[in-house]
């Protein structure tokens, strides 16, 4: 369960399930791209002071379970996760640009849902099972 935290004048426990897809649903998130993406996302989360407690890919999309403070906005967190990961993955794997036919790795949309103490374990298992089929 998400830990209840305290700030100046507020108490919170915020957790979100976020999913976004590769542009055109191209299946490029495998092997070393997958591993590098996860490294990048963990570093971005650390740099921006939020936590990715679960994450898994399935070739053409990624699921993350994200914990943050009330000061973080969902659009801004998604923007930095997608923007920085795309830039660094294109730098590390230039062949991705050719495969995707342009300068965009990610589809511009995303899915987000709040996570409660009642749904957290179910969502964690769902994310962990992304590669198991």
Image: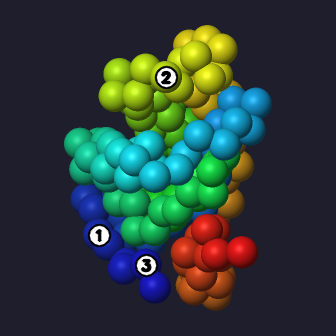
Q: Give the Cα distance between marks 1 and 3.
A: 13 Å
Q: Residues within 10 Å of mark 1 (few under 14, many from 20)?
A: few
Q: Give the Cα distance between marks 3 and 2.
A: 39 Å
> How many numbered marks are there?
3
Q: Which residue carries the number 2 mark?
A: 95
**Which is closer to the viewer, label 3 or label 2?**
2
Secondary structure of the residue carrying tag 1 is strand
5 is higher (above) or lower (below) than 110 = below
Question: Residue at position x 49%, y 22% from top?
Answer: 95
* Res 102 quadrant in image: top right
Q: Which residue carries the number 1 mark?
A: 6
* Res 47 quadrant in image: top left
Question: Residue at position x 52%, y 25% from top?
Answer: 96
Q: Are marks 1 and 3 in contact (CB under 8 Å)?
A: no
Percent position (x, y) of residue 69?
38, 56
Circle nearer the N terminus (1, 2) = 1
Residue situated furthest top in the rendering: 102
Percent position (x, y) of residue 124?
56, 77
Q: Residues within 10 Å of mark 2 (few under 14, many from 20)?
A: few
Q: Is residue 36 visible?
A: yes
Q: Which residue carries the number 3 mark?
A: 2
Question: Residue at position x 46%, y 85% from top?
Answer: 1
Using the image as rendered, state which of residue 19 and residue 16 is in the foreground.
19
Percent position (x, y) of residue 39?
31, 50
Quarter of the figure with the C terminus: bottom right
């Amino acid at each position: 369960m998400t830990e209840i935290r305290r700030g100046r004048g507020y108490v919170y426990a915020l957790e979100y399930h976020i999913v976004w897809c590769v542009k055109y649903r191209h299946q490029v998130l495998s092997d070393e791209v997958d591993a590098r993406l996860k490294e990048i996302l963990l570093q971005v989360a650390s740099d921006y002071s939020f936590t990715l407690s679960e994450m898994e890919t399935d070739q053409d999309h990624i699921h993350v379970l994200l914990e943050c403070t009330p000061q973080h906005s969902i659009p801004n967190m998604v923007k930095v996760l997608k923007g920085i990961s795309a830039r660094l993955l294109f730098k590390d794997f230039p062949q991705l640009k050719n495969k995707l036919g342009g300068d965009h790795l990610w589809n511009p949309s995303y899915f987000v849902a709040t996570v409660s103490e009642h749904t957290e374990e179910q969502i964690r298992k769902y994310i962990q099972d992304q590669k198991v089929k």
